[in-house]
Amino acid sequence: MTTPSRFDGRTALVTGAASGIGKATALRLAADGAAVGCLDMAESVHETAAEILAAGGQAVATTVDVSDPDSVRAAVDLVEGDFGPTRILANVAGVLRFGVFHESSVEDFDLQVAVNLKGPFLMARAVIPSMLANGGGAITTVASSAGVFGQAYMPGYAASKGGVAMLSRAIAWEYQKLGIRSNAVAPGGVETNMTSAVTFPDGIDFELIKKTAAPGYKMMQATEPAALIAFLSSDEAAAISGTVIPIDFGITA
């Protein structure tokens, strides 16, 4: 636990909270005092909430399809019914599919855009009214280094994460006078279930993938982007909005 009073009295929603960066973010925000709504498609999201409760924090979990407006609305209503208006939103849920561009399926492309880009749009749209009515808030969305520079073999992922950066900036600019901040974080390689499950197409040129990882293919832990998300969600970052912050061992330098 770092600063227990950092988010006291604030409700936070975290998507993708069953594992990886999402789980690490939910645990970090709860450790810093937030009441956390843990959202994910996986039933194991309830384990994240249970871990928070066991540590003395406040949490509730529910399954959600972030690409479905009705599912998003139901999840937000459930969490806000328990803990009150949302003040912090962390859009972490994401999917990644590798494929040679001209062989990539339309279904994979649509799925990545639906979860990675439409999901943050729907989540932000659902919580902004509460933020406007209750003193503002902070929205942080996980982009990717693959959405900052050109990346081979992940067209849907790169396109959707690039969109996340501009969505975050659009929100920041529109609500700058209304107390809502919006930022994106752009991690490089992170050790998560998603990255460990990646399968590469046959015959690809691995030289074209190298720039996604630090020298020696160094990968960060999920707690590292989670700590950055917590900072951006806090009053310490009151002057930071409309940014896309790399966290990638310098690969985008």
Image: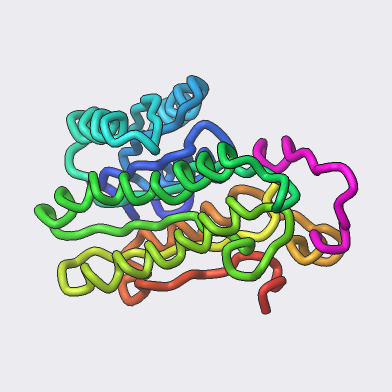
Q: Quadrant of residue 150?
A: bottom right
- Position of residue 222 relative to residue 215, above or below, is above
Q: Residue at x 38, y 63 (%)?
A: 168
Task: Please state the horizontal and vertical placement of residue 25, each as a whole percent of the image.
Answer: 48, 46
Q: Quadrant of the C terminus?
A: bottom right
Query: Most prominent secondary structure in the magenta stretch?
Result: loop
Task: Please state the horizontal and vertical placement of residue 143, each as a whole percent of the image.
Answer: 52, 58
Q: Nearer the viewer, residue 118 or 190?
A: 118
Q: Residue at x 23, y 44 (%)?
A: 126
The boundaries of the magenta stretch are 192-209
Left-right relation of 229 to 144: left
Q: Residue furthest front?
A: 102
Q: Nearer the viewer, residue 101 or 131?
A: 101
- Position of residue 117 relative to residue 163, above or below, is above
Left-right relation of 196 to 187: right
* Residue 119 included in the magenta stretch of the image: no
Question: Tell me, what colour scheme is on the image?
Answer: rainbow
Tally the marks.
Answer: 0
Left-right relation of 205 to 114: right
Task: Please state the horizontal and vertical placement of residue 62, each as a whole percent of the image.
Answer: 36, 25
* Residue 199 included in the magenta stretch of the image: yes
Q: Residue furthest left?
A: 133
Task: Please state the horizontal and vertical placement of residue 37, each as a whole percent of the image.
Answer: 34, 35
